[in-house]
Every structure is written in structure tokens, then in C-alpha cells.
Amino acid sequence: MAKVKPFKGVRPPRRMVTEVASRPYDVLNSAEARAEAEGNPKSLYHIIKPEIDFAEGTDEHDPAVYDRAVENFNAFQQRGWLVQDEKEHYYIYAQTMDGRTQYGIVIAANVDDYMNGCIKKHELTRRDKEEDRMKHVRINNANIEPVFFAFPDNEVLETIIREVSAGPAEYDFTAPDGFGHHFWVIDDEATIERITDEFGKMPALYIADGHHRTAAAALVGAEKARNNPAHRGDEEYNYFLAVAFPSSHLKIIDYNRVVRDLNGLSPAEFLEKLEYKFIIEDKGSEIYRPAALHNFALYLEGRWYSLTARPGTYDDSDPIGVLDVTISSDFILRDIIGITDLRSDKRIDFVGGIRGLGELKERVDSGEMAFALALYPVSMEQLIAIADTGNIMPPKTTWFEPKLRSGLVIHKLD
């Protein structure tokens, strides 16, 4: 069963939150972080992307860069830009995008739960990316940025979310990208106890986004446990920072593909090969969006096509075989185009649905890409089914939006 706890969050004063809060470290490059933080010494980028304090071109993995992260974290606290709460709290964090608001509970999740599979994953992680975040957690002795969890809908927790969010928010602002962020502190002891109890009844939590950060946070906690001869199991390093959302609140958006060439085929030959596995409809020059599971949108030579997978190309009883990313990877990218490794092949690129299908059209029309393929989004039910069966999703399957804003609350490991 899931074990969570409240914690003494390290947070910016209300008047400073918009200056401190930032996008997550992994959604922008060093140059973009440098530009966003320009003229703002309070930006969290000075902690999560500290290479911006060095000359352009400085390796973000240089030891001096990690050292600067902890120097800046300490300085933020000394200057009162980040202040630790005096008592342990849970927090409610809500995000608004396109008129829809999703509400999560900020928790300290348990390291052992990750190690024993109670916190379930659906993606593979890369050791080099894990190690980078492990260094960042170790040197700061804190989880500076949260990970993004989902949990099965729970009426008790839903009621708590409604009651707490009906009151005045501690933070309430719209970020430069237009997304709203709302944050409440839960102070009532009985409510805190109810939250702990309800999570304790759950057989599992699910990583929605942030697999590398989750692995890094858990591995550092386990490392600290091994290195502490007096380890008891209730130390703060046994927990890490997460925002957990009821699964029905979350919406996965499409994650699309653009491909540089047709593997030596003419457009007509390509379409002819597609007909073996797909029913093809010419939709003309107006953007076409996939209408349902097993329906794809193809953009080729200025025209949009509907591709509907023929029976036999998918297995609705198989949590992986039912995925449209599996169908497209097997019967289009592998069998026709010759792309077998989505992680490393330079002939393919991926475009999150937040950018819109217009970007797919632009990249093909520019001549950079030969064709684009838009997929129907994966559902939360599919994600949970894959995690529950111990399967791993193919690469570049899910895209969650909006991303968690970093800097609203930090979790120290001591």
C-alpha cells in the first residue's frame, strides 16, 4: 500500500512566487533558460539550470555547475527568497489550461514504494539522465522539482480537494505561457491525517511524467539509507517530492511523428504499401485530426489522409498491442520506412500535441521532413493497464500538459 507523508515545504513568499517559479529543467535548453532568467536573480533556473551563471557553452555537467546549484539554493534561503514552513503540510496544486483545471495533492512519496513497485512506471529510463538528476539531488540535499503522479479516483480525497480549493489560494497566477497555477496550504491536522490514511489504502501510485526524476530521487534516498549505520526508515531522505493527481483529472495529449524520407519510395508507392494495413481516405488540404483509436492522420505532399488500421493490425486484449504507437511503429515506421529504433534513429523526430498539427504541416512543407503522422492520444486507462501488467510503453507515447511549475515548493532531505 502507498505510504506518503506531509513535509515542511521550502517555498517562496507569496509576493515573490512569480519571480521564483519556472518551467521544469528538461523542457528547455540552456539558451532558453538564460533568456527567461535574464534580469531576474530570483529565477529558479539559477538552481535547476545553473549553467546559465557561466559563460555560454559551459558544459551543464561540469562539477562547477553542480556546485553553483547548491550555492544558489543556499543563497535563495539566506536572502528569504525561499523559506521553509515551520510545520509539516500537504498542499493542493492546481493547473488551468484551455479553461480546464486539474487538482493535485503535493506529497512526500516513499522511496521503498518505488523500489518495490508500489509506485509503478510505464517508461524505460536512461542511466545517464538518472545520474545527472542524482547529482543534483545529492548536492542540494533536496528534491528541488516535483515528479508527476496519478492515482485512482478517490472520493474522500476529491472532497478534500474541493473543500481546500474553495478557500483563498496561497499562490494564484498565470505564467507567461498562459497556464494558470493555484496553490493551497493544508494546515488542518485532521485533514492531513485523512490524506495519509487514504493514500495508505491505495495499492499503487503511477508515474505520469518525470520517470528520470523519480528514479533519481528514489535512488538517492536508498543510497542515503545504505550509508547511514543508524538508519531507521522514518528519516526525511526516505521520501521525495511528488504531485499526485486523480487519474480522471489528467488528459494525455497526442505525441506525433515527422519523418525525413520515404525510404526510397515515391509518394504513390508509399501510399500503395500503406493500403495493405490501412484503409486510406484522402481528406484534402485542410488539417485532419485523428478521430478515434486506431485512426491516424498522414500529411504527405500537401495533402492529409485518414489511415484506419485494418483488423489484424492490433490486439485489443494486449495492453501494448492495442496502442496506436505500436501499430504505427510496426506497420509504417519499421516495415515500410525501415526505422527500428525510435530512440536513436535520426530520420525521425517527435512533436508534442501542444504545438498543434500545424507544426507538422510546416515541417513537411518546408522540405525538412517527407511526411508527418498524427496519432490519437493514449488514455489514462491504457497507461494504468500497462503499468499494472508490468509492461513498458514504446518510446515517445505520452505527452502531459500543462507541465508542473517548478519552485512552488521544495522538499529537503533532512
Image (cartoon, grey):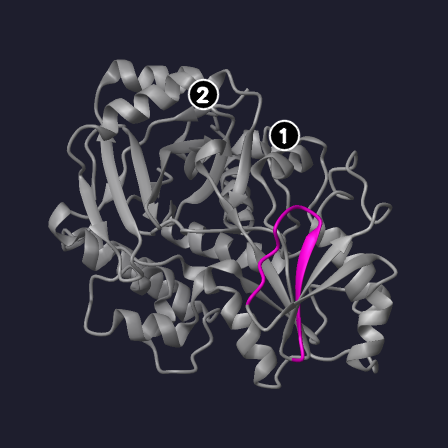
**Which residue is under mark 2?**
154
Residue at position x 81%, y 73% from top? Answer: 270
Residue 44 appears in view: yes
Q: x, y (%) of residue 24?
A: 40, 57
The label shown at residue 116 is 1
The label shown at residue 394 is none
Q: Position of 53 compared to 376: left or right?
A: left
Extent of the magenta region: 287-301
| Magenta stretch: dominant secondary structure | loop
Residue at position x 38%, y 32% from top? Answer: 107
**Foreground: 179 or 6?**
179
- Single out the mark in the foreground, 1 or 2: 2
Mark 1, residues whose alpha carbon is within 10 Å: few (<14), some, or many (≥20)? few
Q: Position of 163 compared to 292: left or right?
A: left
Q: Position of 274 compared to 9: left or right?
A: right
Q: Tell me the quadrant of the picture where the C terminus can be found.
A: top left
In the figure, residue 395 lies in which quadrant? bottom right
Residue at position x 41%, y 52% from top? Answer: 403
Is residue 295 in the magenta section? yes
Residue 338 appears in view: no
Amino acid type indicated by mark 2: Asn
Amino acid type indicated by mark 1: Asn
